[in-house]
Image (tube, grey):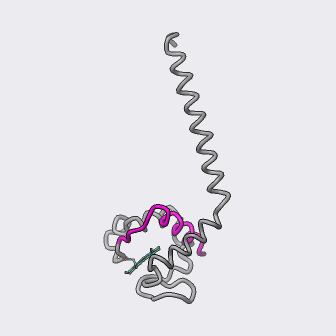
């Protein structure tokens, strides 16, 4: 290694370590609050009119599929992509792309993913 590159390399290594520590912190925070996220998703499901086309348990309208155990069918990351734009996941999708915030999408994906 050329001597003049050493401080640069050290700087990069420090930044990598800082990033790793930050990521670990985010992962821990997410792991600590799964039920809060699921509860938020449950509220978002009601507030965004999902019951207008879907059934969960005994509530809702059976225009689209029953979502009572949709978490058994798809992982949360697929559900999040679906909610961003159904037609990207399935070009023939009849479900409209809804105007959802990223926060609602993450919460809805956690909630739906927990329905087994
Ligand atoms: C206007 C009616 C309508 C609304 C509102 C609606 N959906 Fe759908 N949804 C559908 C239809 C129809 C399908 C069936 C798949 C398709 O589009 O071909 C579907 C499919 C899905 C699927 C995939 C189910 C499967 O088994 O493949 C999920 C998950 C889903 N919807 C979640 C939601 C959520 C969450 C909301 C609220 C943010 C919502 N939907 C709002 C009509 C709707």
Q: Quadrant of ligand 1?
A: bottom left
Q: Is residue 26 left or right of residue 4?
A: right
Q: Is residue 90 above or below residue 56?
A: above
The residue range painted magenta reads 97-116
The part of the image, by quadrant, that contains residue 38 is bottom right
Q: Is residue 106 above or below residue 23?
A: below
Q: How many marks?
A: 0
Tell which residue pokes out farthest to the top in this image: 3
Q: Is residue 2 above or below residue 72?
A: above
63 part of magenta stretch: no
Q: Position of residue 35 (x, y in %)?
A: 65, 67
Q: Is residue 17 left or right of residue 101?
A: right
Tell which residue pokes out farthest to the front in this image: 47
107 part of magenta stretch: yes
Q: Residue at x 49, y 15 (%)?
A: 5
**Helix, strand or loop for the magenta stretch, by majority:** helix
Q: Residue at x 53, y 75 (%)?
A: 70
Q: Position of residue 71 (x, y in %)?
A: 56, 72
């Amino acid at each position: 290694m050329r001597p003049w590159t050493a401080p640069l390399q050290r700087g990069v290594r420090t930044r990598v370590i800082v990033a790793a520590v930050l990521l670990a912190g985010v992962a821990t925070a997410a792991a600590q609050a799964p039920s809060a996220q699921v509860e938020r998703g449950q509220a978002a499901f009601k507030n965004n009119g999902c019951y207008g086309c879907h059934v969960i348990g005994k509530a809702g309208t059976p225009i689209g599929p029953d979502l009572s155990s949709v978490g058994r069918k798809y992982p949360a990351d697929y559900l999040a992509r679906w909610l961003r734009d159904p037609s990207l996941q399935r070009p023939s999708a009849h479900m409209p792309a809804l105007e959802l915030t990223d926060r609602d999408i993450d919460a809805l994906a956690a909630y739906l993913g927990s329905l087994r």
